[in-house]
């Protein structure tokens, strides 16, 4: 039987972690220490716990329903954008259309009115990371809906349309 000890800081308190392992597990830790270049078996355990924690957080995040509000980007670059804003109403449903062939951003997501023949309004913003989030969720097959939360046509174009994207 082998023993691995490690002192950890948890909420500003020292916590001592001691694992008593049967020989196969202790041998495995020795092998992993050699393979990973860790300084000790305790370091292997610390890395394993950190990896487990990271995977658990990622799993939890993926199981939660996505909801986020943000302003539509690129509004002023659409032809007739001022007139198009006047046609919109708060509470209106919007379509999210992936644009993987966009030469500037393969994660680009168009924000459009619900009807197919309506012009594009703008994009899910890339600079603040929402485009990557929404694109990743859509590629994973998760169903998202967009709703116009706030319409301010007299504001600067980048603050004219606040939308909410929710996973259903």
Image (cartoon, rainbow, N blue to C red):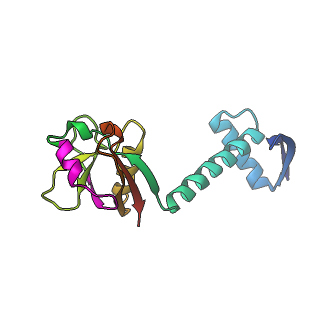
121 to 95, vertically: above or below = above
Residue 62, horizontal then vertical, whole percent: 50, 58
> Which contiguous range is marked in magenta?
81-97
Q: Taking 56 as reference, is 5 left or right?
A: right
Residue 85, horizontal then vertical, whole percent: 23, 48
Residue 14 falls in image quadrant:
top right
Looking at the image, the residue that sits furthest to the left is 117
Depth check, front residue: 111 or 100: 111
Q: Taking 47 as reference, is 7 left or right?
A: right
Depth check, front residue: 6 or 123: 123
53 to 154, vertically: above or below = below
Looking at the image, the residue that sits furthest to the bottom is 168
Residue 25, horizontal then vertical, whole percent: 74, 53
Query: Looking at the rendering, in which quadrant would you find the C terminus?
Result: bottom left
Q: Taking 135 as reference, is 114 left or right?
A: left
Q: Residue at x 28, y 41 (%)?
A: 106
Residue 114 falls in image quadrant:
bottom left
Q: Residue at x 19, y 49 (%)?
A: 84
Residue 85 lies in the magenta-colored region: yes
Q: Taking 55 as reference, is 163 left or right?
A: left
Depth check, front residue: 47 or 148: 148
Residue 83 lies in the magenta-colored region: yes
Residue 154, horizontal then vertical, whole percent: 30, 41
Residue 80 falls in image quadrant:
top left
């Amino acid at each position: 039987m082998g023993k691995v000890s490690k002192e950890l800081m948890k909420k500003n308190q020292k916590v001592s972690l001691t694992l008593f392992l049967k020989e196969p597990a202790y041998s495995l830790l020795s092998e992993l220490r050699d393979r990973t270049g860790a300084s000790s078996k305790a370091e292997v355990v610390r890395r394993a716990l950190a990896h487990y924690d990271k995977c658990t957080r990622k799993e939890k995040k993926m199981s939660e329903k996505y909801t986020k509000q943000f302003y539509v980007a690129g509004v002023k670059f659409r032809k007739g954008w001022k007139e198009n804003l006047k046609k919109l109403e708060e509470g209106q449903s919007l379509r999210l259309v992936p644009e993987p062939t966009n030469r500037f951003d393969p994660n680009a997501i168009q924000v459009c009115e619900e009807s197919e023949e309506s012009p594009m309004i703008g994009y899910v913003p890339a600079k603040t990371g929402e485009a990557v989030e929404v694109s990743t969720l859509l590629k994973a097959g998760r169903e998202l809906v967009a709703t116009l939360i706030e319409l301010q046509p007299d504001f600067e174009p980048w603050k004219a349309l606040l939308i909410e994207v929710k996973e259903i």
